[in-house]
């Protein structure tokens, strides 16, 4: 009887999860100590994910944003992470050995005992993150450590375009370029301004307002992709 009741409870939770996904609501992913190898994910905003001791060895992640998440003691050995933002997240004891990180952001993260031995990094940003608590982390010329809040004097038109984008639910929900509806995320805006000059970034933000499909703007990397596509670089 107890087993039957537990199975029924799982079915109910699964149905509720599907209903929330159909309604476009955020569904928190929660899983610990699974012996099975987990698949990577793509084009997803993950809010308050709670995972522990999972195996992502050799998995592929692309255009993913983790916000306010616990990702502890997870195995990312030999995994490929492209366009992944870890924001305000706890990655304590996770293993990134021999992985490939490209356009990855660690913003205000706990990297205590994270092992980066043999990790290949390209355009990796450590923002307000204590890198000294990580193990075997060797930075190269394509890594950037940012500890000072950027002071930007944006044009009126740029601010108007950023504020207009806050009205787009798909753009605003992951909080990539917005902190609040009226406050830009200067950390990310600064990185984008290092990637392209202000006049062109302004053009891209204006064009983005006209774009019909904005479902996948989950990470800073996706904005870079759009900039390259729009400017035909």
Image (cartoon, rainbow, N blue to C red):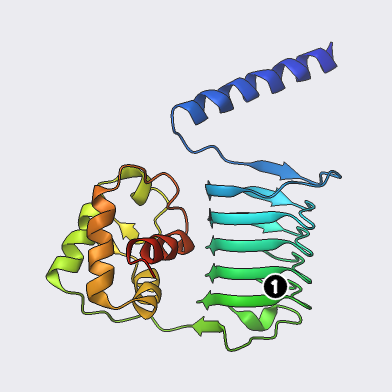
Badge 1 element? loop
Q: Is residue 149 left or right of residue 99?
A: left
User: Residue 227's quadrant in the figure?
Assistant: bottom left
What residue lies at 23% left-to-right and 65% top-to-bottom?
203
Q: Residue furthest top?
A: 1
Asked if one can make out residue 35 in the rendered structure from this viewpoint, the answer is yes
- Percent position of residue 39, x then y: 73, 46
User: Residue 83's quadrant in the figure?
Assistant: bottom right
What residue lies at 47% left-to-right and 83% top-to-bottom?
147
Q: Quadrant of the N terminus?
A: top right
- Percent position of residue 55, x then y: 80, 52
What residue lies at 29% left-to-right and 54% top-to-bottom?
208
- Percent position of residue 5, x then y: 77, 14
Circle 1 packing at 10 Å, graded few (<14), some (14-19), many (20+), is some
Please tell me which residue lies in front, 184 or 108. Answer: 184
Q: Name the residue under label 1.
A: 112
Eyeballing the image, is 130 above or below 23?
below
Please tell me which residue lies in front, 49 or 60. Answer: 60
């Amino acid at each position: 009887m107890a087993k039957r009741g537990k199975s029924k409870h799982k079915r109910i939770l699964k149905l509720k999860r599907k209903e929330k996904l159909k309604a476009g609501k955020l569904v928190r992913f929660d899983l610990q100590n699974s012996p099975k190898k987990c698949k990577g994910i793509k084009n997803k905003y993950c809010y308050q994910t709670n995972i522990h001791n999972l195996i992502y060895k050799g998995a592929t992640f692309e255009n993913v944003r983790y916000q306010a998440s616990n990702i502890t003691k997870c195995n990312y050995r030999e995994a490929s992470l492209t366009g992944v933002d870890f924001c305000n997240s706890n990655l304590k004891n996770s293993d990134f050995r021999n992985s490939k990180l490209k356009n990855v952001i660690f913003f205000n993260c706990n990297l205590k005992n994270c092992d980066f031995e043999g990790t290949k990094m390209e355009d990796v940003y450590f923002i307000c993150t204590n890198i000294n608590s990580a193990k075997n982390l060797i930075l190269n010329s394509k890594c950037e450590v940012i500890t000072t809040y950027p002071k930007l004097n944006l044009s009126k038109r740029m601010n108007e375009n950023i504020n207009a984008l806050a009205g787009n639910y798909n753009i605003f929900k992951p909080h990539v370029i917005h902190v609040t509806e009226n406050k830009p995320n200067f950390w990310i805006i600064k990185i984008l301004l290092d990637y392209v000059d202000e006049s062109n970034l302004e053009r891209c933000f204006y064009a983005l307002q006209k774009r019909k499909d904005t479902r996948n703007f989950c990470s800073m990397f996706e904005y870079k992709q759009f900039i390259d596509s729009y400017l035909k670089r």
